[in-house]
Amino acid sequence: MSKSQSSLATPSVISDFKEITKMRLSISVVFSSLVGYLLGVDTIDFTTLGLLALGGYFMVGASNGFNQIIEKDLDALMDRTKNRPIPAGRMSVNTAFIISSIFTVLGIIILYSINKQTAMFGAISIFLYTCAYTPLKTKTPLAVFVGAIPGAIPFMLGWVAATDDFGIEPGTLFALQFFWQFPHFWAIGWFLFEDYKKGGFFMLPTGKQDKGTAVQTIMYTIWTILISIIPVFGFTGKLKLSVVAAVLVFAAGMWFLYYAILLFKKMTEKAAKQLMLVSVSYITLIQIIYVVDKFIR
């Protein structure tokens, strides 16, 4: 290989920056917070919307950066992570720590400029993800439960940013995204089981690719569906859902449940991967339905 070819084959600094902050994941998390904001706001303030997006990205990027610092040695053992900037030797731990620390400070400052509660929940999210979820991943399957807490905060964070209030509405959004994460992450844990085993990660509730894990995946999918349609009954304050929207959300849930049941029937990595992809489409779709329903109702 020539020198020029080698240079082209080496990931750029920008690519490494994207990877250390997990840009695609961070953007999807920011999307959830923006949806929460749109659901909670009466009049859209685009300055606040921009601050929420920027502050949210910094907070999620910081969490991902700290996670990769802590897991650098384990990442080097797994195929899916061995080419990340730190285990591959393209970025030093000090550089990653500086980036993550700056992101943390900037994220908290930006979210604080929206309101204090938004900054508080953002800080709690980083703390739980970095100091609780990350170290627990090699200790117990309960890590998924702990990780679901910071993972569910962004959806409700948007509502808190819009209203400076935490009540039944953001609580419902939190519960929806909290329960959704179990089938989502168990599907990932299933089709990456062998790779996770190399790093000593315990992601599946039974520790195995078995019927017990598949049954729990179905149960948590059902809980997610039930929570998703609760707003149609008028129990969730200002968070409402029309009958038509509730039917669409329920239909999306049946699609999600079909693939959870398919995993139970087939017990294959292919079925788990299908469930993971459907879970991502599902949560995005119902968030869009919620927002569209609010503004056309």
Image (cartoon, rainbow, N blue to C red):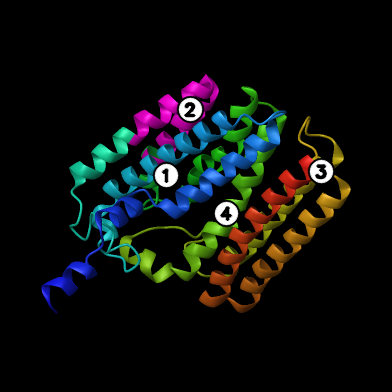
Quadrant occupied by the C terminus: top right
Q: Residue at x 37, y 30 (%)?
A: 106
From the viewer's side, name the closer residue of 13 and 230. Answer: 13
From the viewer's side, name the closer residue of 288 and 261. Answer: 288
Q: Position of residue 240 (x, y in %)?
A: 80, 38
Q: Which mark is residue 111?
A: 2
For the residues marked 2 and 1, what is the alpha-carbon distance in whole angstroms? 23 Å
Q: Which residue is mark 4?
A: 182
Q: Nearer the viewer, mark 3 or mark 4?
A: 3
Q: Is residue 9 above or below residue 73?
A: below
The mark that comes first in sequence, 1 or 3, is 1
Whether residue 237 is visible: yes
Q: Nearer the viewer, mark 4 or mark 2?
A: 2
Q: Which mark is residue 133?
A: 1
Q: Residue at x 59, y 40 (%)?
A: 34
Looking at the rendered structure, the kind of residue marked 2 is: Leu
Task: Please rate how many residues cluster around mark 1, counting C-alpha atoms within 10 Å: few if below 14, some from 14 to 19, many from 20.
Answer: many
Q: Position of residue 160 (x, y in %)?
A: 61, 28
Looking at the rendered structure, the kind of residue marked 4 is: Phe
